[in-house]
Image: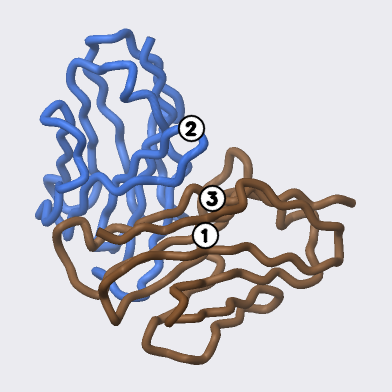
Amino acid sequence: GAGVSQSPRYKVAKRGQDVALRCDPISGHVSLFWYQQALGQGPEFLTYFQNEAQLDKSGLPSDRFFAERPEGSVSTLKIQRTQQEDSAVYLCASSAMRGGLYEQYFGPGTRLTVT
Amino acid sequence: AQTVTQSQPEMSVQEAETVTLSCTYDTSESDYYLFWYKQPPSRQMILVIRQEAYKQQNATENRFSVNFQKAAKSFSLKISDSQLGDAAMYFCAYRSRISGGGADGLTFGKGTHLIIQP
């Protein structure tokens, strides 16, 4: 595809509900990142995949957050038992290679509001 | 852990003028990468410019250039001939040369909201 796509663009969840956020990276990109961007803040790193392997999940804020990329392409970020503090924009980014100067291409984000 | 600080929450500049956005960072590493990203309202974040720490020469991309001062841990962005389309949030970001432990991701500052006055 032309770029990174994410769905849904907006999600409203009642506190305690589970949500699943989808990311379609640029075709052929081996690296995939998830970030959380709270209102008025810069994005914060959540987790990183190289192909299907989750190499780094040090940024996931709690065990309610789970991410997967089973076939090394599409990724899903799942949040169980959502809390109000989970309200944020969730950004996905992909990159052709790991690390270095390789550009991360960002998706439009999913805005999650927990009521 | 590395931190990135953008001390200007908002900057305003007249169209066609030059503006400089500030960024400082804290790290114990000697080799790393620095980036400026632009996030227009309701649009995707895009890369503006990037710099390798071991390169002394400042990066330039058309109207965008950086002033990289490694000893001072400063990485400012200069936008020349400002255009209306430059209006956006600008984020400074750091990436470690090593991998793992969160280092694969970018560490962002809080951003600077750039307003272009016509």
What residue is shown at x 63% (from left), y 41% (from top)? Answer: B41
Q: Which residue is mark 2?
A: A39
Asked whether, in this view, residue A58 is left or right of residue B87, the answer is left
Callout 2: 10 Å neighbours few (<14), some, many (20+)?
Answer: few
Task: Identify the amino acid type marked 2.
Answer: Leu
Image coordinates of residue B55 in percent, x first then y, are 42, 90
Q: CA distance from mark 2 to mark 3?
A: 11 Å
Q: Is residue B62 above or below residue A40?
A: below
Is circle 2 on the same chain as circle 3? no
Q: Look at the numbered discs 2 and 1 and tell me whether their residues touch, using CB distance below 8 Å.
A: no
Q: Is residue A13 above or below residue A70?
A: above
Which of A25 and A104 lies nearest the eye of the viewer?
Answer: A104
Quarter in which the N terminus of chain B is drawn: bottom left
Q: CA distance from mark 2 to mark 1?
A: 17 Å
Image coordinates of residue A69 in percent, x first then y, are 16, 46
Query: For residue B70, which numbered disc appears in the image?
Result: none
Query: For residue B37, which numbered disc appears in the image?
Result: 1
Which element carries disc 3, helix, strand or loop? loop
Q: Which residue is mark 3?
A: B111
Q: Which chain contains the residue that carries disc 2?
A: A
Q: Which chain contains the residue that carries disc 1?
A: B
Which element carries disc 2, helix, strand or loop? loop
Asked whether, in this view, residue A4 is left or right of residue B45, the answer is left
What residue is shown at x 45% (from left), y 46% (from top)? Answer: A42
Asked whether, in this view, residue B111 is left or right of residue B2, the answer is right
From the image, state whether disc 2 or disc 1 is nearer to you.
2
Q: Residue furthest bottom?
A: B56
What residue is shown at x 28% (from left), y 52% (from top)? Answer: A33
| Total numbered badges shown on the rendered structure | 3
Q: Look at the numbered discs 1 and 3 and tell me whether their residues touch, using CB distance below 8 Å.
A: no
Task: Identify the amino acid type marked 1.
Answer: Tyr
In the rendered structure, the colour chosen for chain A is: blue
